[in-house]
Amino acid sequence: MNCGRVGRSFGDGGSSSLADCILLSCHRPWLRRRPDGSRVHGLAQAVWLFPQDRSEYLVAAWLIYLARITGQQEFQLGWKPAWDRLQTGSKLVMASVAPMDVRIELAHDFEEVRKTVAAEVAQLRAHASFARDLIARCPTLRGVVALRARQPWPIGIAITTESCHAADALTTNHKAGHALCGDLLTFEVCALDGSFRWHFDAARLAPKQIDRMTQHLQTLLRGVMADAGQPVGRIDILAADERTYLLEDLNRTAAPYPFELCIHELFEAQVQKAPEAVAVVYEKERLSYGELNARANRLAHHLIELGVKPDQPVAICLERSLAMVVGLLAILKAGGAYLPLVPTFLGT
């Protein structure tokens, strides 16, 4: 992986929030052509895709990943096609980024999703010359200032004809600014060889987050190649070690517990450690550990005077409040066992 930090501005001379943008070039050798040049059909052998087909599969995988991590199925992203000679006249006047509307059905398999994405991409390509044709028919539009505004989408997809894994593309490519169609994140894919890289706002995203997305995308594609018929919503996006860390390592919360102490005794120990700390909050009311302990002690002494003995049930009928917490704690301090009664059920 090649990494470089470049300063950048885009739009009509205005400085953008991406002045400190970082580009990560991520060329994935696991997408390559078979040595004999033949093409193998089926996603189980997607590793042998022609270079021109890789971009389509990568875009579909990226959209599936977005749907998985956001919980959304409908997206509108910024889409920027590969530049060609026919677009040079229109790009000077009208914004080149078009809205890409797509719905990802997580219950479908990868091939069904890929066809959906391909249909939207085909429609975008069919209308790619719209700005040029409009300018040709109405040359006066060149003077409309509003059409010069280029407001990027938060997330964008850019198709380029220049390889994204060339080392010099990070710092010397004067056309790199064309790729920034998302002001937070742009997924740039080369239509010629299927390489890709990320453009992201370093003020809001960290390089390690981009690395994780790359790893997740790779895991997702491997899952597709392993079982192309499974619903895309069930394909693993976490590597085995990351899944173990999230589900097992972070849940190892076992800690020694003083079983010889009662709950009210543990509470009293906390009172000694931090009497001024907030112990309980209800709406706009709150009590510190010291205040709660003092109130519970007074009520506990009163219960003992009334004849409460160890393990004797004591009914408590209160709405949720600070007084309910004081009452429960006082019953335990008096040695009793509290029996909660729900006020709304007393009439029945």
Image (cartoon, rainbow, N blue to C red):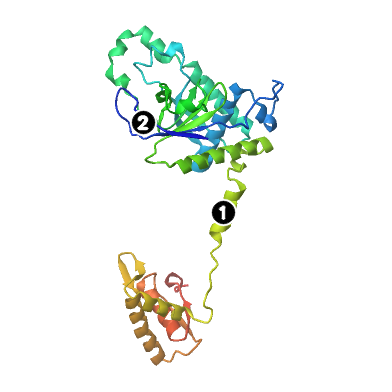
Give percent across and percent down for residue 128: 46, 17
Task: Please say if 138 is above or below 79.
Answer: above
Circle 1: residue type: Tyr
Q: Secondary structure at mark 1?
A: helix
Residue visible at 52% across and 28% down in the picture: 165
| Quarter of the view holding residue 131 | top left
Residue visible at 60% across and 23% down in the picture: 51
Of the pair 210 and 64, the residue shown nearer to us: 210
Is residue 240 something one can see in this rendering? yes
| Quarter of the view holding residue 58 | top right
In 3D space, how far apart are the residues under numbered discs 1 and 2 (Cα atoms)? 36 Å
Residue visible at 39% across and 71% down in the picture: 319
Of the pair 247 and 133, the residue shown nearer to us: 247
Give percent across and percent down for residue 336: 47, 85
Q: Which of labels 1 and 2 is toward the front?
A: 2
Marks 1/2 in contact by CB < 8 Å: the verdict is no
Give percent across and percent down for residue 16: 32, 31
At label 1, counting other C-alpha atoms closer than 10 Å, the crowd grade (few under 14, some 14-19, many 20 or more) is: few
Residue 109 placement, left or right of 327: right
Circle 2: residue type: Gly
| Earlier sequence position, callout 1 versus callout 2 | 2
Q: Which residue was labeled with disc 2?
A: 7
Residue 46 placement, left or right of 324: right
Q: Which residue was labeled with disc 1?
A: 245
Is residue 107 something one can see in this rendering? no
